[in-house]
Image (cartoon, rainbow, N blue to C red):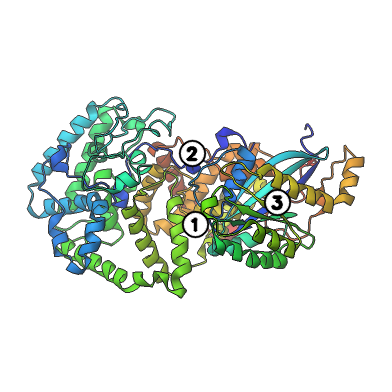
């Protein structure tokens, strides 16, 4: 069984490509991409982004900036672009652009053939092959860009670009669910959703409740970065205050870097830093972002986070909560696992520790997190219901398997490689139902 | 159910983060190697059946995360192991130094009589070598362990070391094993003889009638 290809952990294929662009989430687009000069639909209309806020940054970070701005650009571009849209752009212009992109988008019926360099942007994986052939574009080298500003791509020619096809069109198109693509009805729906997001975001005061409601069913890629920032409280609802807040937070972060980052080789912190160093290259199923500059960004972020947030032991507690919840929801499955000596900790530890990013393709995890942002206590409580729903979605397979080893292999390698937005939506709907039915159920319901 | 194996053993892989435990295991069970492996979270599980000395041995291999922060989890798996791989990376002096700490964890948490074997992995990285082969041999001798330098990358000594540890476990349980041999159709597996009462993980007295 261990050699069964179907059981192979998809996330361990380090070079696998997963359809759908995700880099905006990380704000680490690389190499620098100027939407104007590339004439990419959807980014053409707004004025050139990126400079105003950066110019305001303290000069002490100039060096940092110059070495990393390439990697940050796209993510910030988008925010700044939106911020500027709020400040100075006629909304109509934005909308017109969006519509143009969506028209363009809806005309794409098929996945464009993988394109070789020198195009700095891969075509969007708009319609990945059914069955989610993760390796479809695996070997296509899109990362050797001719962009002179980016020397890193020469030194690290692998992974990133081919795992992260960028597409402004795909981004504006919203969901990457293959099943919704090519359908003009769903394109219209997506366009109208995007309109609603944009209206909320670009208004003078974003109604966060509305934004949450809207986000529950998924956030279009184009507005995901700013929406996550708004929902997580990183940026204020008041649009006027956003640029100043952003600048303050960035200044704060860079101050942390100045304050702490030099201590990474100190006795007290060197273990932490060494571990981060070891982990980054093997952080992601899809081998993200491995240019030196990007690696460094991750190192800094994780290091600052680690030393400011001492380890917490809540994971085991959450596994126990999941176990209790499952026992209330589906005693049959619970007993079956118990009978075969499968411990929740053996499979669900990772679910809690990594919030399902190891169990789902990254595009799905990102979609899942849209809803976590929208749900009150999404990452803490709602996640439990999602995990329960996730486990029980394999009810049939679990009950049919009567061998500990096969059960555990199955639960540690759930076959989700082909999952898309549709699967996540179903999962979320079921989790919501469970929450409704079981959240406040008194514990005496428990056997 | 067709008889798939005669005995069942639980083996454990431990050692510092990044020494290649998962790679060793993947090479052994799937004959695959990925140079940039994703880090293990908690404990992963694989199994394989091999034949040693005419006996079909099903080995369950528990692949632990090397990171300090998971050790409250991973230590729970020591207790039911019958064989343990202690793995360091020949290109990391530090991982070699830490073997001492891993051994003391084994002494503390694993059952008495657990079989141990020392592995110096990444033997293909000769130009980055920080730990001499004789250092590995010396350390293994001190602890009374067998020693292999392995490479998951070039498939050096992988099968050999897994087979060797399995043999050692078999030898250590020769008595029970003779029972299994003489009662070929006996449903009792060695693993069951090893059960203790409290078990935080793993299959124990399965209600299934047959481990065989």
How far from the left and from the top, in percent, is residue A378?
A: 40, 56
Side of A301 relative to B140 (left or right): left
Dot 2: what SS?
loop
Q: What's the CA distance linking mark 2 and mark 3? A: 28 Å
Image spot of residue A142 (x, y percent): 31, 36
For disc 2, the marked residue is: A416
Give the side of residue A105 with respect to residue A114, left or right.
Answer: left
Q: Nearer the viewer, residue A158 or A76?
A: A158
> Furthest-right residue in view?
B182
Are dots 3 and 1 on a single chain?
no
Residue at the spot 15% in from the left edge and 34% down from the top edge: A100
**In this view, the mark in front (3 or 1):** 3
Residue A259 vertical position relative to residue B89 in the rendered view, above or below = below
On the picture, is B29 further left or further right than A273?
Answer: right
Residue A248: % across, % down: 21, 68
Q: Cα distance, mark 1 to mark 2?
A: 18 Å
* Mark 3 Cα-neighbour bin, 10 Å: few <14, some 14–19, many ≥20: many
For the N terminus of chain A, the image quarter is top right
Quadrant in the rendering for residue A424: top left
Q: A388 and B187: which one is in front?
A: B187
Vertical placement of residue B52 versus A278, above or below = above
Q: Chain of mark 1?
A: A
Q: Which residue is mark 3?
A: B11
- Counting the numbered discs, the total is 3
Report the quarter where the C terminus of chain A lies: bottom right
Per the image, the residue denoted by label 1 is: A353
Subunit under mark 3 = B
- For marks 1 and 2, the one nearer the N-term is 1
Q: Are marks 2 and 3 in contact (CB under 8 Å)?
A: no
User: Mark 1 Cα within 10 Å, few/some/many (few <14, many 20+)?
Assistant: some
Instruction: Let me know if residue A327 appears in the view.
Output: no
Q: Could you say where residue B163 lies in the image, as x and y percent from the top left? A: 73, 44
């Amino acid at each position: 069984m261990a050699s069964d290809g179907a059981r192979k952990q998809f996330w361990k294929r380090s070079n696998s490509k997963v359809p759908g662009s995700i880099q905006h989430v990380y704000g680490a687009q690389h190499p620098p991409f100027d939407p104007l000069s590339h004439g990419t639909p959807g980014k053409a209309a707004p004025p050139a982004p990126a400079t105003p806020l950066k110019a305001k940054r303290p000069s002490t970070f100039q060096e940092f900036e110059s070495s990393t701005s390439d990697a940050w650009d796209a993510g910030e571009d988008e925010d700044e672009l939106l911020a500027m849209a709020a400040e100075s752009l006629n909304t109509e212009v934005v909308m017109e652009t969006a519509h143009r992109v969506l028209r363009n988008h809806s005309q794409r019926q098929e996945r464009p053939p993988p394109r070789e360099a020198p195009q700095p942007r891969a075509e969007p994986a708009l319609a990945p092959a059914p069955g989610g052939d993760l390796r479809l574009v695996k070997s296509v080298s899109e990362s050797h860009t001719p962009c002179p500003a980016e020397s890193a791509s020469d030194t690290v020619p692998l992974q990133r670009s081919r795992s992260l096809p960028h597409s402004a069109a795909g981004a504006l198109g919203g969901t990457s669910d293959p099943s919704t693509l090519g359908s003009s009805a769903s394109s219209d729906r997506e366009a109208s959703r995007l309109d609603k997001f944009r209206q909320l975001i670009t208004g003078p005061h974003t109604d966060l409740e509305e934004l949450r409601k809207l986000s529950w069913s998924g956030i279009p890629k184009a507005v995901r970065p700013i929406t996550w920032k708004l929902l997580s409280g990183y940026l204020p609802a008041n649009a006027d205050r956003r640029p100043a807040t952003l600048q303050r937070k960035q200044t704060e972060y860079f101050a942390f870097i100045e304050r702490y980052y030099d201590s990474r080789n100190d006795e007290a912190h060197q273990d932490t830093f060494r571990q981060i160093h070891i982990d980054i290259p093997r952080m992601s199923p899809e081998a993200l972002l491995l240019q030196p500059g990007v690696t460094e960004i991750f190192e800094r972020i994780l290091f600052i986070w680690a030393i400011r947030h001492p380890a917490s032991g809540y994971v085991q507690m959450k596994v126990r909560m999941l176990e209790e919840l499952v026992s209330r929801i589906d005693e049959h499955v619970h007993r079956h696992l118990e009978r075969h000596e499968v411990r929740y900790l053996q499979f669900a530890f990772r679910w809690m520790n990594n919030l399902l990013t190891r169990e789902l393709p990254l595009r799905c995890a990102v979609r899942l997190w849209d809803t976590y942002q929208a749900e009150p206590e999404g990452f803490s409580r709602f996640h439990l219901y999602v995990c329960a729903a996730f486990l029980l979605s394999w009810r049939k397979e679990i009950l049919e398997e009567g061998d500990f080893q096969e059960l555990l292999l199955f639960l540690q390698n759930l076959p989700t490689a082909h999952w898309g937005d549709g699967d996540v939506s179903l999962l979320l709907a079921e989790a919501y139902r469970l929450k409704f039915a079981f959240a406040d159920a008194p514990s005496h319901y428990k056997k | 159910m067709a008889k798939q194996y005669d005995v069942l053993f639980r083996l454990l892989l431990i050692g510092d983060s990044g020494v290649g435990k998962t790679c060793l295991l993947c090479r052994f069970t799937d004959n695959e190697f990925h140079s940039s492996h994703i880090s293990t979270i908690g404990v992963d599980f694989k199994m394989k059946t091999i034949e040693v000395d005419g006996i079909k041995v099903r080995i369950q291999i528990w692949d632990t995360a090397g990171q300090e922060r998971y050790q409250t989890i991973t230590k729970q798996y020591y207790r039911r192991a019958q064989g343990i791989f202690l793995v360091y990376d020949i290109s990391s002096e530090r991982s070699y130094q830490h073997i001492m700490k891993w051994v003391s964890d084994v002494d503390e948490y694993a059952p008495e009589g657990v079989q141990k074997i020392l592995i110096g992995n990444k033997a293909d990285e000769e130009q980055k070598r920080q730990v001499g082969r004789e250092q590995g041999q010396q350390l293994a001798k001190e602890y009374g362990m067998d020693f292999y330098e392995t490479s998951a990358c070039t498939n050096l000594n992988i099968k050999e070391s897994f087979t060797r540890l399995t043999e050692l476990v078999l030898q250590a349980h020769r008595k029970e094993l003779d029972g299994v041999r003489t009662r070929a159709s006996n449903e009792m597996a060695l693993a069951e003889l090893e059960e203790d009462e409290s078990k935080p993980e793993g299959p124990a007295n399965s209600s299934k009638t047959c481990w065989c």
